[in-house]
Amino acid sequence: MSSRTMTLRRRPGAGPSQEVKGAAPTDDESSASSSDSLHAEPANPQTASSVEADGASAPKTGPLSPPPSPSILRSLLPWAGLAVWPLMLALPLVLTHAPNCHYAAVFPRAWYTFDGRRWLDKSLEEGGIWEWGTAAYGGGPLRHPLGLSLGIAAVAVGHLFLQIYFRLHQQQRLGKTTPIQRRGAVQYDYAAALRNHLAQPGGFLLLGLYLALTWVFDLLPPSYYSFAGGIQYARVAACLVVQDCVQFVMHRIEHVAHPKMYRISHKPHHKFTNPKLFDAFDGSVPDTAIMILLPLFVTAHVVRTCNVWTYMAFGSSYANWLTLIHSEVAFPWEPAFRRLGLGTAADHHVHHKFFKYNFGHLFMWFDKVAGTYRAPEEVWGKEFNVGV
C-alpha cells in the first residue's frame, strides 16, 4: 500500500466521500440535479467520480436555473379568457386592417358607400343602393344589405369565440371554476341548450328582424351606413352606456309599472332564479321589444355619428356581454369589473335571485345612483359562494 493511500486513510474524521476532492453540493445544486434527473438518464457512477475529481481544475459555474413553476402557468391560464373581449370585434378588425381581407378588396364598390348622406346621388356617391330591393318594392330606394349582413356576421363570429371560451371554462380546462350560487350551477345538455339559445323567437331572431328593417329601410342616421374609417372606440363605449341607461329605465318600468305588464313581458325571463349562460335571450317577444329593441333605436339616434364598423363593434360587444352576465359560473375578471362598476354575472344573479336589485346589465352605475344596487358580497356564504 502506498504512503499516499495510507495518508488518506489516516486523515482524522475523513469519511468515505472525502476521499474524492470536491465540496458537497449546495441545496440549489441538489435541486437542479434532481430536476435534471427527471429528463436525463442516470450517469455512470464511475464516470461521475472521475468528472468530480477533475473538477478541481475546471472553473466553477453557478447553479442551473430551475424550470418555470407549473403552478405559475396554472395561475395564468384562466386569464386566457380575456382574449374573448377583443375577439368580439374580430370581423370588423379583419375587414378594416388585414390587406388581403380588406372590405374594399373583397366587395364590389357598388355595394357600399363612403358617405351615407349621398347614397342616392350617383354622381357623388356610387354605391349603397340595393337594386333588387328597389325593383321589388315599387321603385323606392333601399339600402344595400352588405353592412347589415356583416353586422350580423360580426355578432355571430364574436359569439362563436365566446362559446369556445365558455365551454373550456365551464369544463375547467382553464382552471377551477366556481358556481355563483351555493346550490350549484344548473346541470344541462350543452348542445341542446345551445340550439334553444339560438332559436329563441324573442332573442336573436327578433333582433335580426329589427336590424334588417331599420337598416334596409334607411331608419338609422346616415353615418351608420358609411364604410369610411375604422372602429371608433369612444363611440362604441358611448353606445354601450346609452344603451344600458335606457335599458335600465325600461327594465325598472317593467318591474314596477303594473303587475299585468310585468306578467306579460318580463316574468317569463324571471323563471330562471339561478340562470345559466344560455338563458340570456330566453324571454318573451314583448320583453325583447321593450328592453332591447327600443333602447337600441334610441341609442342609434342619440349617438348619431357612428360608422358601420362602430355599429358592428357595438352590436357584438353588447350581445356577447349580455350573454356573459347570465353565466352560471364566475369569470376571473369579475372582481376588477366590479370595482369599476361594470356588470358581472354575480351582479346579475343578484337580480334574478331577489328581483328588486341590480336592474342594470352592463353597468352598475345607474343602480348605485338610484339606490337599487346590491353587491354580491352581501350574500356571500348565504345564497352565493364566497369570492364570486
Image (tube, grey):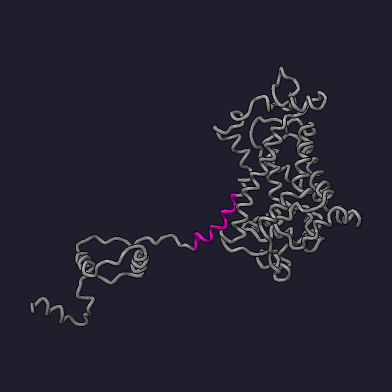
Instruction: Answer left or right for 293 relative to 226.
Output: right
Residue under the image location 13 percent in, 79 percent down: 7
Q: Quadrant of residue 262?
A: bottom right
Q: Residue furthest top?
A: 123
Indicate left or right for 354 with 5 as reference.
Answer: right
Residue 206 lies in quadrant: top right
Vertical arrangement, residue 135 with respect to residue 157, above or below: above
Report the magenta stretch's main SS: helix
Residue 38 x/y as whole percent: 37, 65
Residue 227: image quadrant is: top right
Q: Which residues are magenta?
A: 71-83
Image quadrant containing the C terminus: bottom right
Residue 276 falls left or right of residue 164:
right
Query: Looking at this view, is 206 or 244 the one in front?
Result: 206
Q: Position of residue 281 (x, y in %)?
A: 75, 51
Q: Is residue 255 left or right of residue 190?
A: right
Work out which quarter of the rendered image holds the N terminus and state it.
bottom left
Residue at 23% in and 80% down: 15
Decide: is 44 above or below 159.
below
Q: Is residue 214 above or below residue 72?
A: above
Q: In the rendered image, is residue 234 in sight?
A: no
Q: Is residue 109 visible?
A: yes
Residue, far left: 2
Query: In the rendered structure, does residue 132 fall within the stretch colored magenta?
Result: no
Image location of residue 141, percent across then percent down: 79, 25
Looking at the picture, how far across and down is residue 325, in whole percent? Answer: 70, 55
Residue 370 vs residue 115, the one in the foreground:
115
Residue ID at (73%, 71%): 382
